[in-house]
Image (cartoon, rainbow, N blue to C red):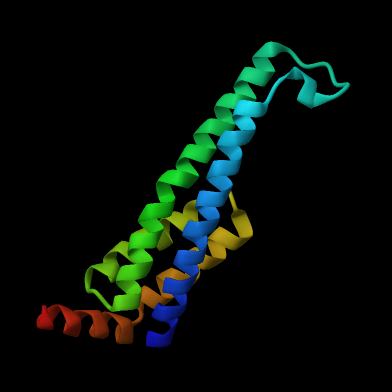
Amino acid sequence: MLEHVKILGRIGIARALLGVALGSYLIWSAQALDIVAYGLTQVTPDTVQFDRTAFMVIGGLCLAMAPVRCVQAILALKGRPSARLFGMGLAIWDAVNLSLFPVSTALGLYGIVVYHNPETVGYFESRRAWA
């Protein structure tokens, strides 16, 4: 089960990089959004402002979660005891987060199974004794 901790660490780094890319793109898109971007549809300025705000909020959340995921992934790859609790929290967040439903939920459940496994718990507890 310990190889799954390393896999989750690599996935966490990849998700952090994707979060930076997606967050940056959403914030850039929000700044470039205007009525002309909607084409021939009839859009009010309020709709454009709502969309800008939504893009900014979601982009900001993606950018805010990226360093959190990256730190947890690095801690997991190094085998630090705090990575298990930190990873369990992120896994629970992913399991209940429905914004990226199939992928996020699956990765969250995978993380819960890996970090809750007795072998993983024993590994991180033994590393705590060394610290």
Which part of the image, by quadrant, shows the N terminus? bottom left
Residue 58 position, x and y percent, is 53, 38
Question: Observer-nearest residue: 84 or 48?
Answer: 48
Residue 41 versus residue 129 in the image, above or below: above
**Res. 98 visible in picture:** no
Residue at the outermost right position? 40
Q: Residue at x 56, y 35 (%)?
A: 27
Which part of the image, by quadrant, shows the C terminus? bottom left
Judge from the rendering whether residue 3 lies leftward or rightward of residue 39; answer left or right.
left
Question: Observer-nearest residue: 26 or 108?
Answer: 26
Question: Observer-nearest residue: 90 or 10?
Answer: 10
Q: Quadrant of residue 9?
A: bottom left
Residue 129 versus residue 38 in the image, above or below: below
Q: Residue at x 52, y 66 (%)?
A: 107
Residue 106 versus residue 77 in the image, above or below: above
Residue 73 position, x and y percent, is 38, 67
Q: Residue at x 45, y 65 (%)?
A: 13
Judge from the rendering whether residue 51 lies leftward or rightward of residue 58; answer left or right.
right
Q: Residue at x 31, y 87 (%)?
A: 119
Q: Quadrant of residue 72?
A: bottom left
